[in-house]
Structure formats: C-alpha cells, structure tokens
Image (cartoon, helix red, strand yellow):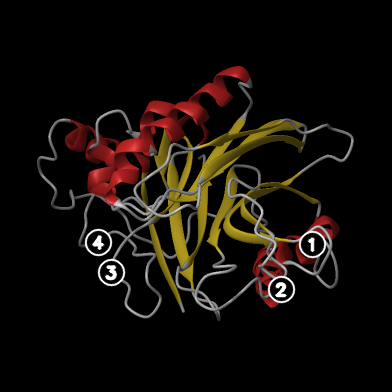
Amino acid sequence: MTRSRGGRGPARLRKLRAAAAGLVGLASPSGVALSAAAPAHADTTWNYAQLNIRGYAGGNNGDPTIATSVKSFVRARYNAGRAPMAVSLQEVCHDPNGLSQLNSLASGANNLPSMGYTTKFYRPTAINPTRSNCTHYGIAVSMLWDSQAMPVVRTSLLPRANVGDERRGVICATTRFGGKWHNGCSPHLHNDSSALTHQAGPVTDFIADFNRDYPHFGKYWGGDLNTDPIPLYTASGSTPWRAGYEEADPNVLHPSDALKTWSIGNPRRKLDYLFAARSLWDDSSIQRYSYALQDHFWMFGRFTRH
C-alpha cells in the first residue's frame, strides 16, 4: 500500500507560523499543490526514509527476515535513482553473536554496504540475554558515505517516561557523500503522554547541539515520536523547528489531512516524522508503504530545491 503527499514550501511556512501563533486557521490554506512526487531533479532533490521496523514487538522476536524487507525497500529506490541519503530506523534487533536484523542489513543480497551505506546502531535498552537474536535492542541510522571519511557518532539516553523499564534514545551521525558532509539522526520516544513532557525537548536540544557542533550541508532527522503533530508542535520546549527543520508532509499540522503512519490495519495517527533542514529545499513530498510484520507505515520523503 502506498499513499503520497506533496506541497509548496511557502505554504508550509504559513501553516507553521499560524500554529506557533496559537493554532489559528487550521483549515488547509489555498495554494497548496498536492502531487504524487516532487519534481525529479537529481542534483537538487534529497531523499530520506523513516522506518520503524517492529523488530521485536508483535511476536516478531528479532525475526531477521524483516531486514530483508528493509534492504528491498532501499534497493528499489536505489535502482530507481532515488536512493535515500539517510534511513532512520527504530526497534532494531541485534545480537553480536548470532543472526540478527542489524547483522542481516550488512550481509546477503541487497546488503546496504553494497549500495554505499554505513549503519550506526545505539542500544539504549540494557542487554537482555533471553531474547534470541535480540540481546541488543535499539535505534540506527544508515547513511550513504564516502568510505574514506570517518563518521562522527553521538548518542543520548532519553529521560525515563512512565512506561516500564525499556529505555529510549537518539543517535546522530555524520557522513561525507557527493563531496559534501551530511548529518542524520534517529530518535525513538515512548508511547506515553509523559514522553512528550520528558523526551521531546531533550531530543530537539540534542539534535540542535549536534548540528551546531557539526554545521554540515545536509541535515536530516526521522523518528517514531509516538506523538500526534499538534501536541508535538505546541508542547513547551519541544518545537522541532527550533533545530532548523520542517517536516516532509505539507499537511502535518492539519489533522484530517496529515498522512497517517499508524497503524497499518487502521491508519488514524501520525506518529512518524521526516524532517530536513529548511535551508535545503523549496518543495517536499511524502509517501507511505506497508510491509509484512509491521504496524507502522514506512515513510519516504523527498525535499527539492528549485
């Protein structure tokens, strides 16, 4: 299943300003052009993907075949000339001593390194030796890179929310590709109202600090924030544009029109986000895709400079 959205950058700016002023005028403004895809100019279009892969939950128990779907997803866009510059992943299983999703991403048919990707993984949850193929559980970011460049990786453990013992975090990395340096980040917030209070602010602060320390050309972050757009954008201290980003969906602040990312069986909430630096683009588009064993749609965003 796929669904697409696209729109003009100036219209989005008007929406965000309205939201910041108190969420006035939430009906879609006139002049928003919706299209199946952004204009395809390879030298001015940046592609990104956001995938919560449900590596352990839902009875998946570290199923390594999920990595096969991830590789196929990336390969299809790579072959079409739309390779994502960065892929943010959450709920990734890893077992250094066995078969796991993280290991599988780097091996076998369509492995990510064969397409020029390097993957960085962060495990905020303590090791659980009882999880076959999933003793390590966390988040990752895969980015196209020049193998001669040494990536910088920075991680942060997020404050606890009122949800069990599992910890959540954020990872950021730098790579060089196409003669330019790029930053990519992947956060995962808890599915609990307290997460918005305790975790959204630290995530945007962490990403803003990372981009200040490494002021590179490309800047992207995608994540499962487990929060609907209106609460996310209006919560004190958690506004994503504070880090200089905007979201790929031009209707992100219009609840009836925003592209829903959860659940696949009953799409009713937008919980997954694709942000790119405002300085890079004029227009954006977003598409969603459903895969077996998943509960979140996988997102593919395009950001175009005219």
Dot 1 or dot 3: first in sequence order is: 1
Residue visible at 29% across and 43% down? Answer: 232
Left or right for 213, reference 302: right
Q: Nearer the viewer, residue 106 or 279?
A: 106
What percent of the width, then of the height, locates residue 261?
A: 39, 64
Q: Nearer the viewer, residue 42 or 225?
A: 225
Q: Nearer the viewer, mark 3 or mark 4?
A: 3
Dot 1 or dot 4: first in sequence order is: 1
Kind of residue sitting beneath label 4? Asp
Q: Tell whether label 4 touches label 3 (CB within 8 Å).
A: no
Q: Is residue 244 visible?
A: no
Picture layout, residue 57 above or below residue 85: below
Q: Which residue is mark 2?
A: 64
Dot 2 or dot 4: first in sequence order is: 2
Kind of residue sitting beneath label 2? Pro
Q: CA distance from mark 3 to mark 4?
A: 11 Å
Kind of residue sitting beneath label 3? Arg
Q: Quadrant of residue 78?
A: bottom right
